[in-house]
Image (tube, rainbow, N blue to C red):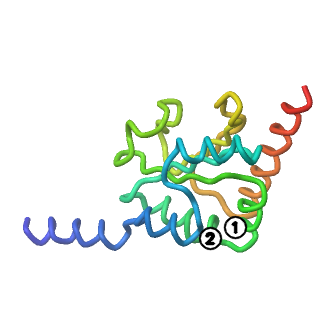
């Protein structure tokens, strides 16, 4: 039993996403209120990324998709990104983003804090970039109304 518990603990450490390290590396904010304020000032959409330290799919999404140079460039140009730990940060962000499944991404209009598009689960770079384009289209259409 001790070997099993030790194995589980080591596995958890091995696959932990280390969200603060990830946020620092890709220049994502860790505070929703700061992201909201910045998005309003810059008239950009908020990209709320909800992950968990224990989640191997979240780590894969971070490593293979969000860290890719193409995704990073588009995020920097068009979004105010914030990364949130589903459990550790609970209470520090709106309940609307309490994702039942992770990784989840909410593309949010900062003027009314309404979600324009939601993605759930790991996705490859190209599919995610298409979703970012779709979110931007929805955001710009909303501005024209």
Give the residue drawn at x 59%, y 47%: 35
Q: Quadrant of the C terminus?
A: top right
The location of residue 123, given as percent across then percent down, is 64, 57
Residue extending farthest right: 144
Q: Quadrant of residue 77?
A: bottom right
| Mark before the other along the chain sequence, 2 or 1 | 2
Compared to residue 95, the image places residue 56 above or below, namely below
Residue placed under numbered mark 2 in the picture: 67
Q: Give the x, y percent position of residue 29.
A: 54, 56
The residue beneath circle 1 is: 72
| Disc 2, SS | loop
Residue 144 position, x and y percent, is: 92, 31
Q: Nearer the viewer, residue 32 or 59?
A: 32
Residue in view at x 52 percent, y 36 percent: 97
Q: Foreground: 36 or 54?
A: 36
How many discs appear?
2
Other residues around mark 2 within 10 Å, as few (<14) / some (14–19) / many (≥20): some
Asked if marks 2 and 1 touch (Cβ < 8 Å), the reply is yes
How much space separates mark 2 and mark 1, taking CA atoms? 6 Å
Left or right: residue 27 versus residue 3 is right
Q: Residue at x 66, y 52 (%)?
A: 80
Provide the secondary structure element on which disc 1 rests. Answer: helix
Q: Viewer-proximal residue, 51 or 121?
A: 51
Q: Is residue 64 left or right of residue 11?
A: right
Left or right: 124 in relation to 55: right
Q: Which mark is residue 3?
A: none
Q: Quadrant of the N terminus?
A: bottom left
């Amino acid at each position: 039993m001790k070997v099993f518990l030790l194995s589980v603990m080591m596995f958890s450490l091995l696959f932990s996403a280390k969200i603060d390290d990830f946020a620092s590396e890709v220049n994502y904010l860790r505070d929703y209120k700061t992201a909201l304020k910045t998005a309003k000032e810059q008239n950009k959409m908020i990209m709320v990324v909800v992950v968990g330290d224990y989640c191997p799919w979240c780590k894969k999404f971070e490593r293979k998709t969000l860290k890719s140079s193409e995704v990073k460039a588009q995020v920097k140009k068009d979004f105010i990104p914030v990364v949130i730990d589903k459990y550790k940060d609970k209470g520090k962000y709106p309940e609307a983003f309490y994702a039942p499944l992770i990784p989840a991404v909410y593309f949010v209009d900062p003027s009314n804090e309404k979600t324009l598009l939601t993605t759930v689960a790991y996705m490859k770079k190209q599919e995610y970039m298409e979703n970012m384009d779709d979110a931007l289209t929805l955001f710009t259409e909303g501005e024209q109304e």
